[in-house]
Image: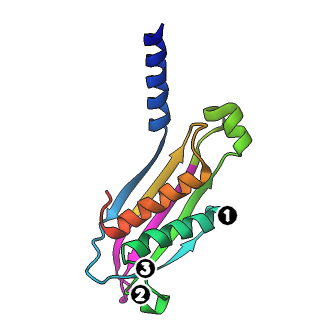
Amino acid sequence: MRRPFAIVLALLAALVLSACGTSSQVTKRYAPAAGDQFAYTIDNRGGMSEENLVTLRSSLDGQLRAAGLLAASPSNAARRVTITINEYRMRHGAARALVGIMAGKDTIRSTVEVVGSDGEVLGSSEIDSGNSTAWGTTGGLVEGHAEEIANFLRGTSG
């Protein structure tokens, strides 16, 4: 009796863990030089909610600050970063809870581009985060997206 329950539980855990993820396709790898600091802007073409933009900025600021990569002010930045939110789709919490995967997939797709002071593109990446299950939170997905952006800027992704 316990063995079938354990198998079902293991399969359910595998489904939950595999259904939420972030991937990035690095178009041009970026490796920060010692002392590089960034100032970034977010172009919200995909229509991310203001609440989630605040979460994205807060998470990204924290990670870049912890890595010593966030410039104190934009004028002090050695590099400019443009984050373009190309697609943003979040299911309503009730839809997620009631019908799960049948309600579609939460998606954030963005392009990250690092530009030097001379205007040369030093690095670029396409980042795609999604969650198709009823588990997980919108904030968690946004924070995971921010982490993938920070990884690219630290030179540790892809």
Q: Considering depth in this image, is 76 or 44 the residue closer to the camera?
A: 76
Cα separation, mark 3 vs mark 1, equals 22 Å
Q: Is residue 46 in view from this perspective?
A: yes
The answer to whether residue 148 is above or below residue 65 is above
Measuring 52% from the left and 47% from the top, which residue is drawn there?
130
Asked whether, in this view, residue 129 is left or right of residue 31, the answer is right
Mark 3: few/some/many CA within 10 Å (<14, 14-19, 20+): many
- Tell which residue pokes out farthest to the front in this image: 2
In reply to whether residue 109 is colored magenta, the answer given is yes
Residue ID for mark 2: 77
In reply to whether residue 98 is colored magenta, the answer given is no
Looking at the picture, how far across and down is residue 147, in whole percent? 44, 60
Residue ID for mark 1: 51
Residue ID for mark 3: 70
Question: Helix or strand or loop: what does disc 2 sit on?
Answer: loop
Q: Quadrant of the C terminus?
A: bottom left
Cα separation, mark 1 vs mark 2, equals 26 Å
Main SS, magenta region, reads strand
Looking at the picture, how far across and down is residue 11, in whole percent? 45, 24
Q: Is residue 47 in view from this perspective?
A: no
Residue range highlighted in magenta: 107-124
- Tell which residue pokes out farthest to the bottom in this image: 75
Asked whether, in this view, residue 1 is left or right of residue 123, the answer is right
Q: Considering depth in this image, is 70 or 31 the residue closer to the camera?
A: 70
Mark 1: few/some/many CA within 10 Å (<14, 14-19, 20+): few
Measuring 68% from the left and 66% from the top, which residue is drawn there?
50
Which image quadrant is residue 68 in? bottom left
- Tell which residue pokes out farthest to the top in this image: 1
Asked whether, in this view, residue 146 is left or right of residue 92, the answer is left
- The amino acid at mark 2 is Ala
